[in-house]
Amino acid sequence: MTLNIQWDKIICLCLVVIVFLSLFINTGIVPTESMDPTIKMNSRIWYKRLTLPTINSINVDDIIVIHPTEAFYNHEFGDSETKLLVKRVVGVPVSVIHAFTT
């Protein structure tokens, strides 16, 4: 019994899956140690794209990925090598945040 494989359909299906995933999922490398020990520097991460965040889509303790704008590089805390900012959310609207020094 011979196996009749229709390669054109398989290739088309793979391309559709790749395009679909690239619309919602992205990868990147963590450029700094700011998330250590949760995420190590130079670790490759996969993250979900969120184009229009709603009021309940981002919560405290979520880890978010930000692509810096040109204005970020005009401040002393940014450099031209930073491709991604990976940060943890510490507050949302109506949160009360207390800062303590030790």
Image (tube, helix red, strand yellow):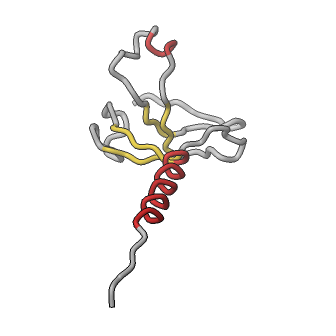
Q: Is residue 1 above or below residue 76?
A: below
Point out residue 6 in the picture as x, y percentages from the top left corner.
Answer: 43, 70
- Quick check: 67 left or right of 40? right
Q: Is residue 21 above or below residue 36?
A: below
- Quick check: 82 left or right of 51? left
Residue nearest the observer in this picture, 47 or 87: 47
Q: Is residue 17 above or below residue 46?
A: below
Q: Is residue 72 above or below residue 10?
A: above
Residue 28 image-quadrant placement: top left
The C terminus lies in quadrant: top left
**Residue at x 44% of width, y 62% of height:** 8
Residue nearest the observer in this picture, 6 or 19: 6
**Residue at x 47% of width, y 64% of height:** 9
- Quick check: 16 left or right of 30? right
Point out residue 93 in the picture as x, y percentages from the top left corner.
Answer: 70, 35
**Residue at x 51% of width, y 55% of height:** 16
The N terminus lies in quadrant: bottom left
Point out residue 4 in the picture as x, y percentages from the top left corner.
Answer: 39, 79
Point out residue 30 in the picture as x, y percentages from the top left corner.
Answer: 34, 37
Residue 23 image-quadrant placement: top right
Residue nearest the observer in this picture, 102 or 61: 61
**Residue at x 36% of width, y 33% of height:** 34
Count of marks overlaid on the render: 0
- Quick check: 7 left or right of 52? left
